[in-house]
Image: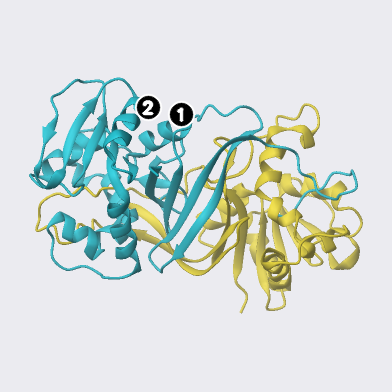
Chain colours: A cyan, B yellow
Amino acid sequence: MTKVTAQLSVSADGFYAGPQFAGDGDWMDSAESAGFFRVTRWVTEAMSWRERQGFAGGEQDTNSAVVAESFEAAGAYVMGRRMADGGEVPWGADPPFRAPVFVVTHRPRQTLLREGGTSFTYVTDGVASAVEQARAVAGGKNVAVAGGGSLVRQVLKAGLLDELELHVVPVVLGTGLRLFDADLDLGDKEAIELTPTRVIHTPQVTHIRYAVDGRAPLVLDDRGSGGGPTVTTN
Amino acid sequence: MTKVTAQLSVSADGFYAGPQFAGDGDWMDSAESAGFFRVTRWVTEAMSWRERQGFAGGEQDTNSAVVAESFEAAGAYVMGRRMADGGEVPWGADPPFRAPVFVVTHRPRQTLLREGGTSFTYVTDGVASAVEQARAVAGGKNVAVAGGGSLVRQVLKAGLLDELELHVVPVVLGTGLRLFDADLDLGDKEAIELTPTRVIHTPQVTHIRYAVDGRAPLVLDDRGSGGGPTVTTN
């Protein structure tokens, strides 16, 4: 059955890139890029990712298997406009997705067909429509929300996300683009509950996969204090 | 050898409590408290924590062992003023620390002696002084930064933290008090590197322990792209 999934590499303090690049100069020299490449280093070192990019070498290890599994599980992608624009040139004629990609954008544009099974279809009527269009062609595989973080947040906020995998990288960036930065429209004393379904740990990164259970009230759970107030040592 | 350690329960999106309580009404009814009790639920359910509080029952499981180990490892504590104030009444005559606690505050106050080995010494000359005073009496055990989050951040920022354990709870709070919210005085393209030293996973919480390696430059690490720009699929 098709699930809607997202996975993102984040620092221990929740950033997936450095502070957003303002647009002057080269993105590759920016602080945004420096943070981004730090948290995705485990990806760029993975042989399975390098093969998709046409690069030689890389590590054939647990992390590489996680990347390979992620590519394999995706039957179609949903992607933010900024990521799609940024990738268009470097991904070249044979982008790594090898599946239909639906780009959420405000600007209509003709579908872009690439080699290897990748296509970019520009969806102007919102996130839910992009997810539905991706689901229709995913062939029973997953719809993978490729990023960036703001799109992942939108899909989560809309209640469309079934699974979230965080690749938690052992670094504190201190500032930058956060996966969870903006209002998710959660009410007072409301949260989105998750269930961890898989944890894989390597020295480079801790992979935590969650099923998204959905919104739930935060019930005061002051267990067994006999009615008096308690403060934990945390 | 004495290490300076900190451990904090956080949501998957990095909050250790709900939005800060403004001060009208009962903290126990606040959104801050609702978030706090959600991320510390695994603690309040742990038998080892309940025993220290004088509560019956609880789970005798892996999470309880993590709490017990944490209490056992601490020879002295450093604590923020807000946490110490909030705990003073509910902790009562026999607080759960059973070790000297050094409270970082601007307000001088006489040392408070409690039963069971707990004392509260009020330190007005800064975080580094509190850590040093705690180290002097820790008897070779660890100096544990008990919280809250802003004190943990200060100790990290000052380069005094040796070990950080995050107890990552499977919930998205969306808003609240973040462990990593404020400027850590990191330079442009600078980060604090960590090394994961232990990961323990349970259905309720994923415990990730890091050694703090310290500040390091973020070097652009665009492996093997042959010089051209790359964008990962993350």
Residue type beneath disc 1: Ala
Q: Where is residue A210 in the image (x, y as percent from the top left)?
A: 49, 50
B154 is higher (above) or lower (below) than B5: above
Q: Is residue A24 visible?
A: no
Considering the numbered disc 1 on the image, is that residue within a helix, a strand or a loop? loop
* Quarter of the image that includes the N terminus of chain B: bottom right
CA separation in Å, label 1 and label 2: 8 Å
Residue bearing mark 1: A158
Residue type beneath disc 2: Ala
Q: Position of residue B154 (x, y in %)?
A: 56, 52
Q: Where is residue B223 in the image (x, y as percent from the top left)?
A: 19, 61
Q: Which of B63 and B23 is in front in this view?
A: B63
A16 is higher (above) or lower (below) than B62: above
Marks 1 and 2 on same chain: yes
Residue bearing mark 2: A128
Considering the numbered disc 2 on the image, is that residue within a helix, a strand or a loop? helix
The answer to whether mark 1 and mark 2 are in CB contact below 8 A is: yes
Q: Please give the name of the residue rendered at 19% of the width and 60% of the height, measured from the top-left corner.
A: A50
Q: Please give the name of the residue rendered at 34% of the width and 32% of the height, measured from the top-left corner.
A: A131
Q: Earlier in the sequence, mark 1 or mark 2?
A: 2
